[in-house]
Amino acid sequence: MSAASKTAPWAKWKPWVWVALLALLTVAVYFPVHTHPFFTMDDDGYVVSNPHLRLAFGKVASWAFTTYDLANWHPLTWLSHALDVQFFGAEPAGHHDMNLLAHAINVLLLFEVLRRATGFAGRSFMVAALLSVHPVNVESVAWIAERKTLLSTMFFLLALGAYGWYARRPRLGRYLTVALFYALALMSKPQVITFPFVLLLWDYWPLGRMRFSPSVPSQDRVPAQPISRLLLEKVPLLALCLGSAILTMQAQSYAGALRYYPLGVRMGNAIVSYAHYLKNAFWPSRLSVFYPHAEVRPWV
């Protein structure tokens, strides 16, 4: 039997077929959120009883970029909620629909970014489908206050895709596009602070920008670069990380969140939390919207 005859039938599918399947899958799984009410935890402060979101847009923008409300600095998240309030008012259905739309866009973005970078449509589909239906993502989609996670993920993926575009033909304008999307991601939620380090992994595989990178049939395959140059490329992005970290610490301090536990305990809890998240990625069980701190012994 020839190699061609062994090819799976879906290997020749057009990208739009994969995209349509992912969109249908995501909407089918999450459409029930349309009928959900506001959640009693955080939705009130973020949307229902937030008077700032009902101001004129200029005043909302001024407030969004200067406030540390709810212990965060995420102006794009506030602006997103403000737009929803303008369109949907106090009816939760529209707010939930926007979360679902953002999640669907993220799923499709992940597929396209991976497909362009690796050249594998089927495998990219499987990864994107996992993002779509993985239980740990239910919280971000079904909880209106978690819009920040969806927005930061969206801009993170746009920045990742723009980086592949930049890597094919490095130009200042293309690099600034990467930096812009990354800044927008940080202004949505600082969880994407690890982006420059993700880019180093992306350089190794699948872009193959390192001299010892494995060979991949990638549309974004580019000539190898010295490690020193790859590291230097990330310095402006690390500066954005530093700025976001400073603003986040100020926001947390403003809300009094840093006074409860000493630094050593918080660092220990961070390690335990990373392990917990990794466990949930492979075996999602006993999921919750809130995990109480284990006091001064977070490993117990």
Image (tube, rainbow, N blue to C red):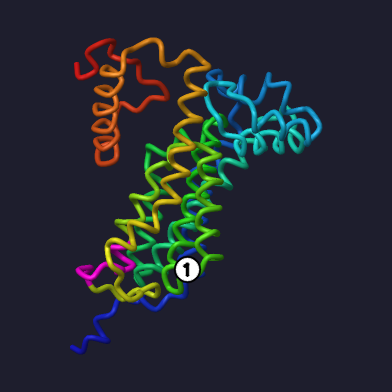
Q: Residue 6 lies in what quarter of the image?
A: bottom left
Residue 202's place in the image compared with 42, above or below, is below
Specify whether residue 148 is painted magenta.
no
- Please state the extent of the stretch shown in magenta in the rendering: 203-214
Mark 1 is on which residue type?
Answer: Trp
Specify whether residue 205 is painted magenta.
yes
- Residue visible at 45% across and 44% down in the picture: 239
Q: Position of residue 279 (x, y in %)?
A: 24, 35
Q: How many marks?
A: 1
Q: Quadrant of the N terminus?
A: bottom left
Q: Quadrant of the C terminus?
A: top left
Compare residues 85 and 23 and report the one nearer the observer.
85
- Residue visible at 28% across and 73% down in the picture: 216
| Disc 1 element | helix
Q: Position of residue 40 (x, y in %)?
A: 56, 18
Tell me the crowding category of disc 1: few under 14, some 14 to 19, or many 20 or more residues within 10 angstroms, Cα based: many
- Residue visible at 56% across and 46% down in the picture: 184
Q: Is residue 47 left or right of residue 215?
A: right
Residue 226's place in the image compared with 300, above or below, is below
Which secondary structure is most common in the magenta stretch?
loop
Q: Which residue is mark 1?
A: 165
The single residue placed furthest to the bottom in the displayed view is 2
Q: Is residue 225 left or right of residue 2?
A: right
Q: Position of residue 98 (x, y in %)?
A: 62, 42
Q: Position of residue 113 (x, y in %)?
A: 44, 62
Q: Is residue 218 left or right of residue 179?
A: left
Residue 221's place in the image compared with 28, above or below, is below
Residue 114's place in the image compared with 32, above or below, is below
Compare residues 70 and 289 and report the one nearer the observer.
70
Q: Residue 269 lies in what quarter of the image?
A: top left
